[in-house]
Image: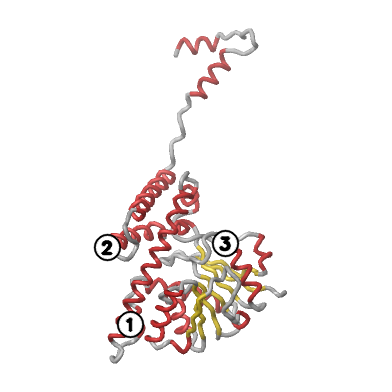
Amino acid sequence: MMATCDSIQNHKPTRSGTSDVTHCADLALSITPPRTPTAAASAAHKLYSQIRHIHTSLATLPSLAPGEQINELLTRLVNLCIVPYGVDFTADFLAIPGVAALCDTLRPLCSAAEGELENYWALQILRDARTQANQQCEPSALLRSFPYHQNYLDLSRLECCTLDAFLPHAPRNVAFIGSGPLPLTSLCMLDRYPQVAVHNIDRDSSALQVSQELCQQLGHGARMSFVCEDITRPSTNGTDWLSFEVVFLAALVGTDTESKMSILTSLAGKLRPGSLVVARSAWGLRTVLYPSLELSANIEDTGLEVLVEVHPWTKVVNSIVVFRVKER
């Protein structure tokens, strides 16, 4: 090292005009050690490893139906994703190579598991309702047996409180797209708005059959209607879209921003001006579980205007975006 320093002090220009000083500087740059990862970056990589391990475990299960192992895996996954991480940490996590691909394969597993979970509990509650048909039993008591009942209540409360700021009066006619076999949001609407009627739309006929029978058994058949329809295709079921004051779009209707925007554009053309559309989305680490609806200036081309976007910091997983159909 001393010899090198001496040569630097007594350098002479080389034939090409460069000096030993330049050579030593280049050498120093070439052996500069890599930057030490920050604590946040290290924590983000640790979280990535945990989520990847859960994904691997879920992907190798013979079934995604409720059970001890899958329940434990999904609970761990949700708890990891709903932590209120800071902006920098979230950016570090989402920038990790492989995260985007991991999310693309993990979300369909979560979606399928959610469908299995709702179907399992819808059938269980339906059996309990039949058994206790001649007894004094509140429907809400049966619904509370669903493990995530409180989450649905909290999400519905968030949606309704947000909606009330933009509605001149309580809605009387609401549609819910993607209602599934256990239409808890629709049932929450009935409790929140005594005069409302809810039209449940799903492309899965078996899910609709279970949910319709369940609602009738619970005594809510008069204010609930059901139709099997794929809203990504031209309507053939005679749904009166102009009658709805509010339309809800479930989180799993549309797998990405592009497909969600296509659905929203279609809805804007069917609904009357002034109607509201509530689309569920996700933000931050919650996008590991659900697809996000990314808003941009292109929203003006859909025939909708954005009224508000709400991101929860509680155990509620979904964000919500409220749109209004513009005048045509």
Q: CA distance from mark 1 to mark 3?
A: 37 Å
Question: Left of 81 or right of it: where is 27?
Answer: right
Query: First in sequence: mark 2 or mark 3?
Result: 2
Mark 2 residue element: helix
Describe the element under mark 1 as helix, strand or loop. helix
* Residue 297 x %, y %: 66, 60
* Label 1 CA crowd tier, 10 Å (few <14, some 14–19, many 20+): few
Task: Indicate the quadrant where residue 286 lies.
Answer: bottom left
Identify whether 218 is placed above or below 9: below
Front-lying residue, 77 or 308 = 77
- Which residue matches tag 3? 259
Task: Residue 68: give its label.
Answer: 2
Q: Nearer the viewer, mark 1 or mark 2?
A: 2
Q: Which amino acid is tagged 3?
A: Ser
- How many numbered marks, from 0 up? 3
Residue 15, position as x, y percentages in the image: 63, 7
Which of pointers 1 and 2 lies earlier in the amino acid sequence? 2
The image's colouring method is: secondary structure
Camera-side residue of 163 and 218: 218
Choose between 102 and 33: the one closer to the eye. Answer: 102
In the image, residue 229 lies at what x, y percent?
Answer: 53, 74
What SS does tag 3 mark?
helix
Nearer the observer: mark 1 or 3; the answer is 3
Q: What residue type is disc 2 on?
A: Glu
Q: Residue at x 58, y 77 (%)?
A: 236
Report, in whole angstroms, how far the alpha carbon at label 2 lies from the one at label 3.
Answer: 34 Å
Q: What x and y, as percent, mark residue 160?
A: 51, 77
Q: Which quadrant of the structure image shows residue 154? A: bottom left
10 Å crowding of disc 3: few (<14), some (14-19), many (20+): some
